[in-house]
Image (cartoon, rainbow, N blue to C red):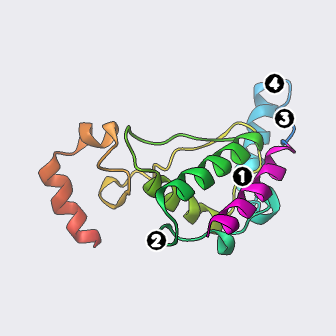
Amino acid sequence: MDRYVSQLIEKLAVAEANPTPATNLGNSYEEFEATMLRIEEEANVSAEHLLNVSYQELPPVDRMNHQQIQNLLEAILNALSAKGTDVSIPGNGVPVEVVYSELRKMFQEGFHAMPGWVIDFCGGNCPSCAFADYCESCKEIWTKEELEKEKKLFT
């Protein structure tokens, strides 16, 4: 698996070496708003097109060791950053396995190809969120008991 993960990292490095140029957002608020609306309504760009790696190529967590996941996740984050997409992880101390697994799911949907885009993983439904145990916003809204009770409804 080490060689395969290295090959994926090499493909992601090619994407990282070719950053996405900044988008012209216009010279007025109206132009900015129109550009943002157009971008939000556009279809996502496939992960393979944007990052040179498809969902099918990314191994599931249970096929890699911790270091392989860490290295591959770092390469994905670097490539996304070069393409203008930042990733904000909701919480502290989130295991790389959780972050990788959730980011891997996004490879199925593709990504917005616009510098300045942020993936924050927050869909607003704490009980079904993989980051709920680490997220400070979730802890402000839900007690541990309430969250556990609601989580049972999603499993």
Mark 3 vs mark 2, foreground winner is 2
Q: Choose between 141 and 19: the one closer to the eye.
A: 19
Query: Callout 4 environment at 10 Å: few (<14), some (14 to 19), or many (20+)?
Result: few
Labelled pair 4, 3 in contact (Cβ < 8 Å): no
Q: Amino acid at mark 4?
A: Ser
Going from N to C along the chain, the mark reached first, 1 or 3, is: 3
Image: 147 above or below 116: below
Task: Kindly identify which residue carries mark 2.
Answer: 62
Query: Callout 1 environment at 10 Å: few (<14), some (14 to 19), or many (20+)?
Result: many
Task: Kindly identify which residue carries mark 1.
Answer: 112
* Point 66% across, 75% down: residue: 56
Magenta: main secondary structure: helix
Residue at the farthest left position: 145
Q: Which secondary structure lies at badge 3? A: loop
Task: Kindly identify which residue carries mark 3.
Answer: 22
Q: Which secondary structure lies at badge 4? A: loop
Q: Amino acid at mark 2?
A: Asp
* Point 79% across, 45% down: residue: 16
Labelled pair 1, 4 in contact (Cβ < 8 Å): no
Q: Amino acid at mark 1?
A: His
Mark 1 vs mark 4, foreground winner is 1
Residue 84 seen in the figure: no
Mark 4 vs mark 3, foreground winner is 3
Query: Which quadrant holds the N terminus?
Result: bottom right
Query: Which quadrant holds the C terminus?
Result: bottom left
